[in-house]
Amino acid sequence: MNFKERLREEIEYKGYLIKEIAAIAGVNNNTFLSYVDARGSLPNVETGVKIAKALGVSVEYLVTGEDSIHSQKLSEIQQIITDLTVLNETQLSDIKKMIHALV
């Protein structure tokens, strides 16, 4: 997946229209369209930062598909899941209640 595809996917996932994100990011709509259409143009760094902020993702994610913060959290979550596998049903029920209370 490349920048254009990740950008389109993120816009769709967040439920925005392309013109809405363009406006939020402060980018001309026609210019923004060049990033998501067949041309697949790449924005300059400043514009890329604006777009990433408007979407609530990192520039790193839009460019590479990876996010160091996300990767770290995923690793921590996987460790928690491993730890949960040794708990009995009562303990799991208690943990579930605590998680729901926190959320």
Image (tube, rainbow, N blue to C red):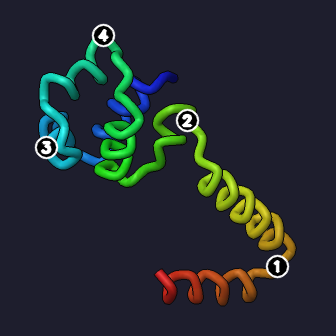
> Is 13 above or below relative to 9?
below
Q: Are marks 2 and 3 in contact (CB under 8 Å)?
A: no
Which residue, given by chain and number where applicable, does mark 3 sit on? 23
Q: Nearer the viewer, residue 90 or 41?
A: 41
Q: Which mark is residue 87?
A: 1
Structural distance between the alpha carbons of marks 4 and 2: 20 Å
For the residues marked 4 and 3, what is the alpha-carbon distance in whole angstroms? Answer: 20 Å
Give the labeled residue for mark 4: 39
Mark 4 against mark 1, which lies toward the viewer? 4
Residue at the spot x=86%, y=74% of the render? 86
> Above or below — where is 80 with respect to 29?
below
Instruction: Read off the residue under disc 2.
Output: 65
Q: Nearer the viewer, mark 4 or mark 2?
A: 4
Measuring from the top left, give residue 43's x and y in whole percent: 35, 27
Which numbered disc flags the more N-terminal residue, 4 or 3? 3
Q: Are marks 3 and 1 in contact (CB under 8 Å)?
A: no
Q: Is residue 66 left or right of residue 56?
A: right
The local crowd at label 1, few if under 14, some if 14 to 19, many if 20 or more residues have their Cα within 10 Å, is few
**Mark 2 belongs to which amino acid?**
Gly
Looking at marks 2 and 1 on the same chain, the residue that comes earlier in the sequence is marked by: 2
Q: Crowding at label 3, few (<14), some or many (≥20) Cα neighbours within 10 Å? A: some
Q: CA distance from mark 4 to mark 1?
A: 53 Å
What is the C-alpha distance between the residues marked 2 and 1?
34 Å
At x 51% / y 23%, what residue is drawn?
1
Q: Nearer the viewer, mark 2 or mark 1?
A: 2
Q: Is residue 17 rendered to the left or right of residue 74?
A: left
Res. 18 mark? none
